[in-house]
Image (cartoon, grey):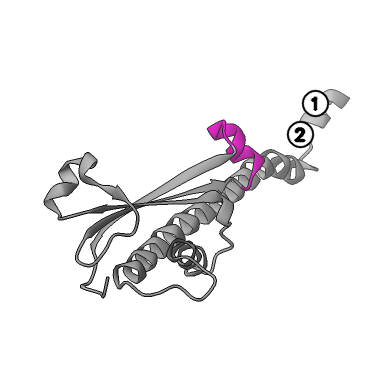
Amino acid sequence: MSRALRFLDCRRGATALEFAFILPAFFLLILLIIETSWQMAIAAGVDHGARRGARWASLGAAAPEGMTRMDRLQQIVLTSSGLPLQGGRLTITPTAFPSFGALATPEAGVPGLGGPDQVVRYVVQYRSVLLTPFARQALMSDILTYRSVFVVQNEPFPG
């Protein structure tokens, strides 16, 4: 048997070669799972924080000394999930309406947290940075924007 034919029959190193072919795909799959899980956690955290913040604001509660009500609302959204959310990436846009029917007419809204019994629409946006270079390349962006919209009616708190 010639030397070339013996080389083709040799099985030494086959496992290492197969591992070398599979490793990049496996590593990529793990990175994809990590990135997706992190982004889902961010989205759920922003949604949870927006819900808690809108509830707090609807009660007409006063902000702690040295803070505005908008500052307190932003703090609630950022801290309620337990995730390391950054304030510079968060935008909260509250718009007050006289009633639920007025929501159909955007011009009827007034910026702000509203007064007693007013209906307030909260638009909460968070720009999340992607963790992995692969995700940045695949999406051709460094940032994903999450948006939550909540509509609540303020309690009849003292104006």
Residue 35 magenta-highlighted: no
Rendered residue at 53%/34% (across/down):
139
Does residue 60 lie above or below 39 as drawn?
Answer: below
Disc 2 crowd rating (10 Å Cα; few below 14, some 14-19, many 20+) is few
Q: In which quarter of the image is residue 3?
A: top right
Examine the rendered structure and indicate whether residue 156 appears above or below residue 100.
below
Q: Which mark is residue 153?
A: none
Whole-percent x, y for residue 16 in the image: 76, 45
Is residue 135 on the magenta stretch? yes
Q: Name the residue under label 2.
A: 9
Q: Please, what is the three-letter code of the amino acid marked with disc 2?
A: Asp
Disc 1 marks a residue whose amino acid type is: Leu
**Residue identified by numbered label 1:** 5
Q: Quadrant of residue 51?
A: bottom left
Residue under the image location 22 percent in, 71 percent down: 155
Disc 1 vs disc 2: Cβ atoms closer than 8 Å? yes
The residue stretch that appears in magenta: 131-141
Location of the N terminus (image quadrant): top right
